[in-house]
Image: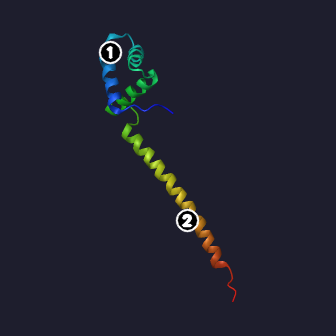
Amino acid sequence: MPRQYPPEFRQRALRLLEEALPDYESEFEAIRQVATKLGVSTEALRKWRRASEIDSGARPGMTSVEHAELKRLKKENAELRRANEILKAASAFFAAELDRPTTR
């Protein structure tokens, strides 16, 4: 499972990266150096930077807030589907009970 870093750590890493960018020829080189210094993977730092750019509007894409809302809605949708299946099964069961002849 991927390691979770606190938001404060991520923000600090992004600030360090922004400060380091002018000192390197490429963005990748700056990311690699800062990631090594902080002990995180270069891919993690790259993803944090892209997410930060999307959240600030500098890059197109789904923001963190939109992503969280979509995740919440998918979870809610799955729960509602499960509840609907339970209700269908209960409805079929009780309908069968009503159709059963009563013996006296």
Determine whether, in the image, residue 101 is placed left or right of residue 5: right
Amino acid identity at mark 2: Leu
Across and down, in percent, residue 70 comes to: 43, 44
Across and down, in percent, residue 67 comes to: 41, 40
Amino acid identity at mark 1: Ala
Determine whether, in the image, residue 65 is placed left or right of residue 94: left
Residue at disc 1, secondary structure: helix
Tell me the number on the disc at residue 20.
1
Q: What residue appears at the point 46 percent right and 31 percent down from the top-left corner?
A: 3
Q: What residue appears at the point 40 percent right and 36 percent down from the top-left corner?
A: 62
| Nearest the eye: 8 or 96 | 8
Compared with 29, 46 (above or below) is: below
Residue at disc 2, secondary structure: helix
Compared with 65, 12 (above or below) is: above
Whether residue 58 is visible, yes or no, is no
Tell me the number on the disc at residue 87.
2
Packing grade of label 1 (10 A; few <14, some 14-19, many >=20) is: some
The image quarter containing residue 4 is top left
Cα separation, mark 1 vs mark 2, equals 58 Å
Compared with 74, 58 (above or below) is: above
Most extreme residue toward the bottom is 104
Across and down, in percent, residue 93 comes to: 62, 70
Across and down, in percent, residue 36 comes to: 42, 17
